Amino acid sequence: MSDGNWVPAKLDCSDGVTVLEPQAYCAYQVDFGIARPAVPFRGAAITVNRKPHPANAQREHTYWHMVTEGEPEITRTTPILDRLERIPWARPVLEHVGASGVKAWENVRGSDRHFCVWHDRVNYLVVVKQTVDTFLLKTTYCPTPQRRMKLHTEYAEAKRRGRTF
């Protein structure tokens, strides 16, 4: 563990994506599986989409969206190494909103209301979408330097408007 003893170690990626992906899915199941209570968030619960992903019917939609990128969804066929190795970070970052280094703010994207939870010290972003009665874990990733600059700007604007927490 690192950073205040609550950010877990990354998964070992030395054997490559083929070996790492099943380990990452297992870690995801431990943190977001049916047997684990949902993460509380702003008075409701964070849920995951357990339906099969269109690009990989063997994996839950939320998980596959967390470890891949691309549009349309069907093109998300190859997991990304740095996303896989950081899967154990998602739940702890959500559980530590308000901790030192963890910035959280509302972000409207089109007609959807999202919340960004960014641990800027380890550069890890978790995106949660508000639904009618809950929140849906959408994706996680390590922002590029250019995206980091945009996130700092978004956060500052949200803070100015009173949309941080």
Image: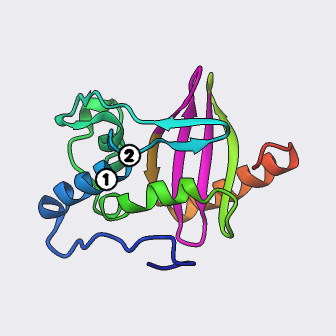
What number of labels is visible? 2
Residue at image mark 1: 30
Calculate the distance from the C-alpha at mark 1 to the C-alpha at mark 2: 7 Å
Q: Position of residue 85 (x, y in %)?
A: 31, 65
Q: Please tell me which residue is depicted at 28% across the width and 62% down the height of the picture.
A: 81
Residue at image mark 2: 36
- Whether residue 87 is situated above or below residue 163 in the rendered picture: below
Q: Please tell me which residue is depicted at 73% across the width and 53% down the height of the picture.
A: 155
Q: Position of residue 68 (x, y in %)?
A: 31, 47
Q: Is residue 114 magenta?
A: yes
Q: Please tell me which residue is depicted at 29% across the width and 42% down the height of the picture.
A: 64
Crowd tier of the residue under label 2, counting other residues whose Cα lies within 10 Å: few below 14, some 14–19, many 20 or above: few
Quarter location, residue 26: bottom left
Quarter location, residue 35: top left
Q: In this rendering, does residue 143 appear at all?
A: no
| Left or right: residue 78 compared with residue 95 | left
Q: Please tell me which residue is depicted at 44% across the width and 78% down the height of the picture.
A: 1
Looking at the rendered structure, the secondary structure element under dot 1 is helix
Disc number at residue 7? none
Q: In this rendering, does residue 30 appear at all?
A: yes
User: Which amino acid type corresponds to the residue marked 2 in the rendered image?
Assistant: Arg
User: Which amino acid type corresponds to the residue marked 1 in the rendered image?
Assistant: Val
Magenta-highlighted residues: 113-137
Majority secondary structure of the magenta segment? strand
Q: Are marks 1 and 2 in contact (CB under 8 Å)?
A: yes
- Whether residue 68 is situated above or below residue 119 in the rendered picture: above
**Of residues 46 and 83, which is closer to you in this image?**
46
Between disc 1 and disc 2, whose residue precedes?
Answer: 1
Closer to the observer: label 1 or label 2? Answer: 2
**Of residues 143 and 140, which is closer to you in this image?**
140
Crowd tier of the residue under label 1, counting other residues whose Cα lies within 10 Å: few below 14, some 14–19, many 20 or above: few
- Whether residue 108 is situated above or below residue 27 in the rendered picture: above
